[in-house]
Image (cartoon, rainbow, N blue to C red):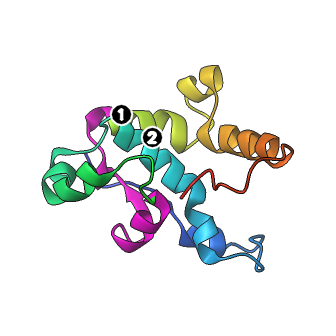
């Protein structure tokens, strides 16, 4: 399968309509959420597992996936990190709202946006949801 770039943080902080008054790493939050979900379901490639076994072993609820995404993955989510099932899922759910899966079950960026809007309307503790 050909190399695919699913998302890059810089596509979001460098966009014309991107807010300029927030940290650049905020452009990676939605990507890091998806990456975390994939890691928790072991949708990572054998190569990623071999190269980053120690990192994977440390990935728990206190792990900073966004920082890892920037520091280790250079802010890029690609097909290199995902196994066959992960690639198929990313293609169906993450990359477009036009797939049969997305039309039936929803599209990641819309789901993320809907969730963010719902969470911003709820007053919560000062404990960060995502570290």
Was residue 54 drawn as part of the magenta stretch in this picture? no
The residue under label 1 is: 41
Q: Which residues are magenta?
A: 65-85
State which quadrant residue 109 falls in.
top right
Marks 2 and 1, how far apart in space? 6 Å
State which quadrant residue 98 falls in.
top right
125 vs 66, left or right, is right
Give residue 60's position: percent from left, percent from top. 38, 47
Query: Which residue does the image show at 74% across and 50% down from the upper left?
Result: 125
Please say if the residues under marks 2 and 1 sit with CB atoms less than 8 Å apart: yes
Query: Dot 2, crowdedness within 10 Å: few (<14), some or many (≥20)?
Result: few
- Counting every numbered tag in the picture gives 2
Furthest residue to the bottom? 20
Query: Dot 1, crowdedness within 10 Å: few (<14), some or many (≥20)?
Result: few
Query: Which residue does the image show at 52% across and 49% down from the upper left?
Result: 33
The residue under label 2 is: 37
Furthest residue to the top? 104
Above-or-below relation of 59 to 111 = below
Furthest residue to the right? 121
Give residue 27's position: percent from left, percent from top. 61, 66
Asked if residue 14 shows in the view, the reply is: no
Foreground pick, 38 / 99: 38
Asked if residue 32 shows in the view, the reply is: yes
């Amino acid at each position: 399968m050909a190399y695919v770039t699913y998302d890059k943080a810089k596509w979001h902080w460098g966009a014309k309509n991107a807010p300029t008054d927030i940290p650049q790493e905020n452009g990676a939050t939605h990507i890091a959420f998806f990456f975390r979900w994939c890691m928790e379901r072991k949708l990572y490639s054998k190569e990623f597992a071999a190269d980053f076994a120690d990192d994977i072993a440390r990935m728990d609820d206190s792990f900073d996936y966004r920082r890892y995404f920037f520091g280790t993955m250079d802010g890029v989510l690609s097909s290199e990190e995902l196994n066959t099932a992960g690639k198929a899922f990313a293609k169906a759910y993450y990359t477009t709202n036009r797939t049969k899966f997305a039309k039936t079950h929803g599209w990641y960026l819309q789901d993320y946006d809907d969730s963010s809007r719902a969470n911003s309307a709820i007053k919560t503790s000062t404990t960060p949801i995502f570290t």
